[in-house]
Amino acid sequence: GENFRRKARYCADGHKTGATASVTYSTVVSRDSVRILLTIAALNDLDVLGADVQNAFLTAPNKEKCWMIAGPEFGPEEGKSFLVVKALYGLKSASFSFRTYMAEKLAELGFQSTLSDPDVWLRAATKNDGEAYYEYVLMYVDDILAISCDAESILREIQIPFKFKNDKIESPEFYLGAR
């Protein structure tokens, strides 16, 4: 499915680094929040669409100072030291870096995190008939669920700074293991 392209993944030896618990947080919406918001969506005839961010951690700027020594795969650059500027998979702070970056982007789109669940984001909106309501974005690491009269436009806004796997925006069949 990847057009026979070769992929290389550089993975940090996160087990060799020290990181405080405050930077190891990953965005994980609660099942209760999902159930409540799916009920709200059903009762208010709102669309529910999902997407999955491709290479999520690699989209985010790294929050810690990391460097690496280039191996033979870097050709003439072998042996040189490189500063790691993106949150590599395996870094203890990678999830935190991605969550922080996503939070910044959602805030730019007018969403704010709720007090009851920091991984549920909302913004005020108005239906075509003038009725006021809230649009929601739910985050589970790199899985996004949008709930709105026009959920697709929310995901298209999010897709500007983030690439979705296979460019897919679709109705979810499963979310957090539930049908």
Image: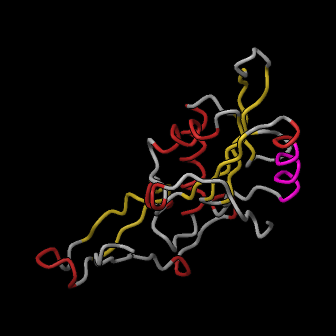
Taking the magenta stretch, the answer to whether it contains residue 38 is yes
Q: Position of residue 26 (x, y in %)?
A: 66, 60
Q: Main secondary structure of the magenta part?
A: helix
Q: Nearer the viewer, residue 90 or 21?
A: 90
Q: Residue furthest top?
A: 130
User: The C terminus appears in which quarter of the rendering?
Assistant: bottom right
Q: Nearer the viewer, residue 76 or 133?
A: 133
Q: Position of residue 100 (x, y in %)?
A: 58, 48
Q: Position of residue 32 (x, y in %)?
A: 88, 55
Q: Which residues are magenta?
A: 31-39
Dividing the picture into quadrants, the one containing residue 23 is bottom right
Relative placement, left or right, of 144 versus 162 is right
Q: Position of residue 123 (x, y in %)?
A: 71, 29
Residue at 88% across, 39% down? 43
User: The N terminus appears in which quarter of the rendering?
Assistant: bottom left
Residue at 80% across, 67% down? 178
